[in-house]
Amino acid sequence: MKKAFKWIMTALLMVPLLSSCMAGRFMSNYALAPTPHGVDDIERTRHKADSLMPGSTAWYDGLKAQGILKDTTIVGYKDFKVHACYVPAKNPASAQGTAIVVHGYGDNHLVFLYLVRMYRDTFNYNVLFPDLQYHGYSEGDHIQMGWNDRLDIEKWIPVAHDIFKDDFMVLHGVSMGAATVMMTSGDPLPEYVRAFVEDCGYASVVLQFNNNRKQSFAFIPPDVLQSASLVTKIKYGWGFWQASSVKQLKKCDRPMLFIHGDADDFVPFDHLWQNYNAKKNGYKEMWVAHGAVHANSYAKYPEEYTERVREFLQKVKKM
């Protein structure tokens, strides 16, 4: 009887544990290995690029047809092949620098063509804009949420420098791309990387996933994040708690512009303050785009967005 009771109690204790493990596996797969992705999702993102700035893909296709805009690949993190496009400044002889533009979750190099056009056509910068792993034409076995993406960006930095030979480089990312930029900013980087622009990036992966959980799976307890992080650690080699923009920003001493819409509830507005306050060293600026939802600051205020970034870069160049 005692033995039977022990077995029953053990089974009852195992039920929530197994449920947590199953939920953790589901959450890890759901968040980090969605379908469709990559090449299969290119057409959707072409439409998205044009919705953000009409004529973007025609502009892209035209430069590509002329051989001005080109593709390249390198071997990235974990030996996956990663892809990027690059294009010289509108007037290459008087180029003002180089920008690396980093896209967000589920997107690819096409989506933020409005930023590529802003840097190239308006600021006269050279631009390299990569596909992060598991996106666009890049290989990869999962979405890395910016954490290991930063290691690929750190490989793209010298590639862009070798192509364009500039001594001034800015990294500019949106959403997960912004988190990638912030996470990169805390690592040792070449001196010619002079500035960063982050637009609506999250403070950490665990905070972002917890917000997603509350929005879409409120019935799942927050403890599932521990299980999902463990599954991710075993399967991919990193955990949610180590992937933090805030921790990396504490080590950043180079200028950064922080942008966030105050109507953003996908990456909640308070992430802006956590990120901004975490950067203790070096110059920083903040711009709050009033009424802008997630990744909508440029679409809502294209002229002000452009001028804010232009003025920030001009200040940095004088430092």
Image (tube, rainbow, N blue to C red):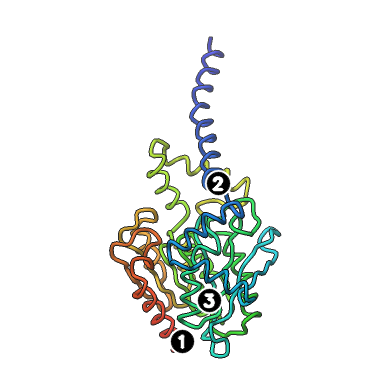
Which amino acid type is marked by label 3? Ala
Q: Disc 2 marks which residue? A: 34
Q: Would residue 290 appear left or right of 52 to someone viewing this image?
A: left
Which amino acid type is marked by label 2? Pro
SS type, badge 2: loop
Give the number of the disc on residue 89. none
| Residue 16 shows in this picture | yes
Q: Position of residue 249 (x, y in %)?
A: 46, 68
Q: In which quarter of the image is the C terminus?
A: bottom left
| Residue 242 shows in this picture | no
Mark 3 closeness class: few <14, some 14–19, many ≥20 residues within 10 Å: many
Q: Position of residue 303 (x, y in %)?
A: 35, 75
Q: How far apart are marks 3 and 2 (CA)?
A: 29 Å
Give the number of the disc on residue 317. 1
Q: Who's the residue at 47% across and 74% down the image?
A: 196
Q: Earlier in the sequence, mark 3 or mark 1?
A: 3
Nearer the observer, 249 or 45: 45
Q: Mark 3–mark 1 contact, CB under 8 Å?
A: no
Which amino acid type is marked by label 1? Lys
Q: Disc 3 marks which residue? A: 99
